[in-house]
Image: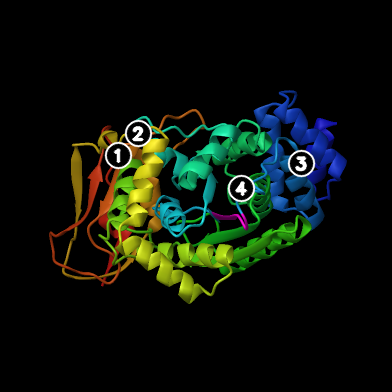
Amino acid sequence: MIVDIINKKRLGKELSYSEIDKFFNAYLDGDIKDYQMSALLMAICINGMTDEEVFALTKVFIDSGDVLDFSGIIDNMVDKHSTGGIGDKTTLVIAPIVAACGVPVVKMSGRGLGYTGGTIDKLESIGGFKTNLTDEQIIKQVKDIGVVITSQTANLTPMDKAIYALRDVTGTVSSIPLIASSIMSKKIAGGADKILIDIKVGNGALLNTKKDAKELSRLMREIGKIYQKEVVTIISDMNTPLGYSIGNSLEVLEAIDILKGKEIDSNLYDLCISLASSMVSLSKGIDKAAAAKEVFEALNKGRAYQKFLELVKYQKGDLKKCTVSEKVKYIKSPKDGFIDSINALELGKLSVALGAGRVSKEDKIDFEVGIKLKKLVGDEVKKGEVLATVYYHKDFEMPKVETIFEIG
């Protein structure tokens, strides 16, 4: 039976709901091993899935656990998700901004996937920060302070949680059907009424072409229709890293700078404003321009940063323990010129080599290592000028400057 299902998908044939249900639940129960599930995931990655198979897999994920209900607590609950990218710390900025605008935020996030860092890993670089909350704790916190960022609860799509970790280390992270089922099952089970999806495209993202991004967008909107959820998607560039920092503690510190009104001349800041405005617009039923006005006010008056401090305190975090390594090396410009491009994928690979990401699902993250860019695309540079600072603990091979920075 197990091998028959694997072979069926390997040959590109459509699996029935019953076959998907039995196989994935058997894996969750421990009756199917990692190597067998890995074989099926690879067959899906290579041959894809029909819409009906994706709908079936999404349902199986949702039905594997509880579904949260925030009706009576939050009207028009809006959730945001990013497909992930190098330096993507938007949730750390957006959640407190939106909450400061009076829109409750319950954000369930994941760990690192591929070369991209996970929001939960980043938050755990804040000493003591609790990311594993119960349903009861989530509901109490959103009532008390209006914002929660948590990992998936034990009873929320536990099947996706298990598959997510396996995808990360089996080369199956870029499968559109698996991405769609994973994201949408979590958003639906998490109780969202309206869902904003930031689909990243480029060499530093799970998806490399706009064609794939449009297909993922279509598929997630179709899933939303089945469950009567409004799904809005945007497609954003990930050929260049988001912001200045890559690495867990470094990204938290950059998010704090933005919330304090610093480092606002980056693609990260622009994207955060756009996403936060869209969330406020969706929740309040106002146009995006009016929502943007509220977003800027929350930032400029310091309410967003204060909301972030509330979030950290409520979830037992201590920002004094969010530290970076004292050991540094520098990437310097080999010539005068202007930065034409920065290769996000190569920086992602470097961050994993430093220990900021995972090679296997058992790997421990080194929160203190990473890369801080000193220059962005379009900046003028002089020969010998520092382009980036690399924070490290263990020995690593420094890549050639030309593989990361194109200087014209």
* Distance in Å between CA atoms under marks 3 and 4: 27 Å
Q: Can residue 110 be seen in this view?
A: no
The residue that label 2 is drawn on is: 366
The kind of secondary structure element at disc 2 is loop
On the image, the x and y values in percent for residue 48 come to: 72, 53
Q: Residue at x 70, y 58 (%)?
A: 229
Q: Between marks 2 and 4, how big is the CA–CA gap?
A: 38 Å
Q: Mark 1 points at which residue?
A: 369
- Tell me the distance, in whole angstroms, between the alpha carbons under discs 4 and 1: 40 Å
Report which residue position mark 3 lands on: 60
| Marks 1 and 3 close (CB-CB < 8 Å) | no
Q: Mark 4 points at which residue?
A: 73
Tag 1 near tag 2, CB within 8 Å: yes
Mark in the foreground, 2 or 4: 4
Residue 367: x percent and y percent? 34, 36
Residue type pointed to by label 2: Asp
> Where are the magenta residues, as a range?
75-80
Circle 4: residue type: Ile
Query: In the rendered structure, does residue 295 fall within the stretch colored magenta?
Result: no
Q: Which residue is drawn at 25% across and 42% down?
A: 391
Which one is closest to the eye, mark 1 or mark 3?
Answer: 3
Label 3–label 2 contact, CB within 8 A: no
Q: In this view, does 187 lie above or below 263?
A: above
- The color scheme shown is rainbow
In the shown orientation, is residue 212 left or right of residue 269?
A: right
Query: How far from the left and from the top, in percent, is residue 208?
Result: 53, 61
Task: Please state which of residues 107 and 343 is positioned toward the viewer in this rendering.
Answer: 107
Chain-order first, disc 2 or disc 4 = 4
Q: Quadrant of the N terminus?
A: top right
Quadrant of the rendered image containing residue 176: bottom right
Structural crowding at the residue carrying mark 1, measured as other residues with C-alpha within 10 Å and reported as few (<14), some (14–19) or many (≥20): many
